[in-house]
Structure formats: structure tokens, C-alpha cells
């Protein structure tokens, strides 16, 4: 039986790893930024109003606020049947 000579396969393995790394790096660079969420103020029964502002759902220390609403109201994400339950955060 012949023994396996690794020195013949090493250049091929390096080339395959290099091509794979190039594709992985390219795919990471082409990731698009997230689309900002529309934030809404809510009424006392947690229903959304028509006031909108661009926010983000990625948690950061500062809440997204609607400055022209009463007392800088916090913006919420509209879900389901016009419900505003999830608070949104200030976009970066």
C-alpha cells in the first residue's frame, strides 16, 4: 500500500481555506443596516396613536422619545391589533 503524502495535498487545502475565508469576509461586509422602526405614542389603553418617529429595537441606555408629544413621551412599537407594548430605543 502506498502511504499518503500530505505535502501534495497541503497547497490544495490552503487554497480551499483561502477561498472560503474570502467568501466569508465578503458576506460580512455586505450585511445591510437594519431598517429603523416606526415608533408611536400610546393611549391609556395601550393603543397606538398616529404620531410617528424613527427608532430602533436594539437595546441602548436611551429610550426613543417623541419630543413634540406631551412630556417627551416614550415611543413604542406597533404590534398586533394596533397595540403599543414594546418600548423602542434611540437609534445610533
Image (spheres, rainbow, N blue to C red):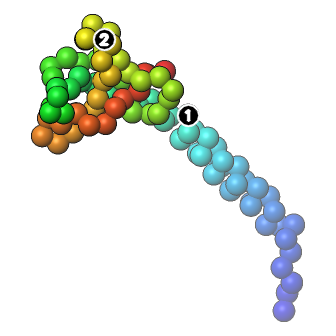
**Which quadrant is the N terminus positioned in?**
bottom right
Q: Where does label 2 land, which residue?
A: 71
Question: Within the image, what quadrant is residue 43 found in?
Answer: top left
Q: Residue furthest left?
A: 81
Please report whichever mark, 1 or 2, sits nearer to the chain's N-terminal start: 1
Residue beneath the point at 87% across and 66% down: 7
In the displayed structure, 26 sits above or below 38; it is below
Q: Quadrant of residue 14?
A: bottom right
User: Element at badge 1?
Assistant: helix
Q: Residues within 10 Å of mark 2 (few under 14, many from 20)?
A: few
What residue would you read off at disc 1?
A: 29
Q: Is residue 42 left or right of residue 16?
A: left
Q: Residue at x 83, y 79 (%)?
A: 4
Q: How many marks?
A: 2
On the question of residue 48 being in view, the answer is no
Q: Give the spatial CA distance, label 1 vs label 2.
A: 41 Å
Q: Nearer the viewer, residue 84 or 53?
A: 84
Residue under the point 21% across and 39% down: 79
| Residue 23 seen anywhere in this rendered image of the structure | yes
In this image, 17 relative to 59: left or right?
right
Q: Is residue 91 left or right of residue 5?
A: left
User: What mark, if any, has residue 69 been given in the picture?
Assistant: none
Select label 1 or label 2 by which is in front: 2
The x, y position of residue 92, in whole percent, is 49, 21
State left or right for residue 67 relative to residue 42. Answer: right
User: Residue at (42%, 24%) from the top-left corner?
Assistant: 63
> Circles 1 and 2: CB distance less than 8 Å?
no
**Image vertical order of residue 71 relative to residue 80, above or below:** above
**Label 1, residues with CA under 10 Å away: few <14, some 14-19, many ≥20:** few
Estimate the x, y position of residue 42 in percent, counting from the top left: 20, 26
| Location of residue 39 in the rendering, given as x and y in whole percent from the top left corner | 28, 24
Amino acid at each position: 500500500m502506498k502511504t499518503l503524502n500530505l505535502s501534495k495535498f497541503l497547497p490544495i487545502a490552503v487554497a480551499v481555506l483561502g477561498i472560503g475565508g474570502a467568501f466569508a469576509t465578503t458576506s460580512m461586509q455586505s450585511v445591510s443596516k437594519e431598517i429603523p422602526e416606526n415608533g408611536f405614542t400610546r393611549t391609556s389603553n395601550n393603543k397606538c396613536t398616529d404620531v410617528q418617529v424613527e427608532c430602533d429595537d436594539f437595546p441602548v441606555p436611551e429610550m426613543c422619545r417623541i419630543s413634540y408629544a406631551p412630556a417627551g413621551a416614550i415611543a413604542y412599537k406597533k404590534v398586533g391589533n394596533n397595540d403599543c407594548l414594546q418600548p423602542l430605543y434611540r437609534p445610533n
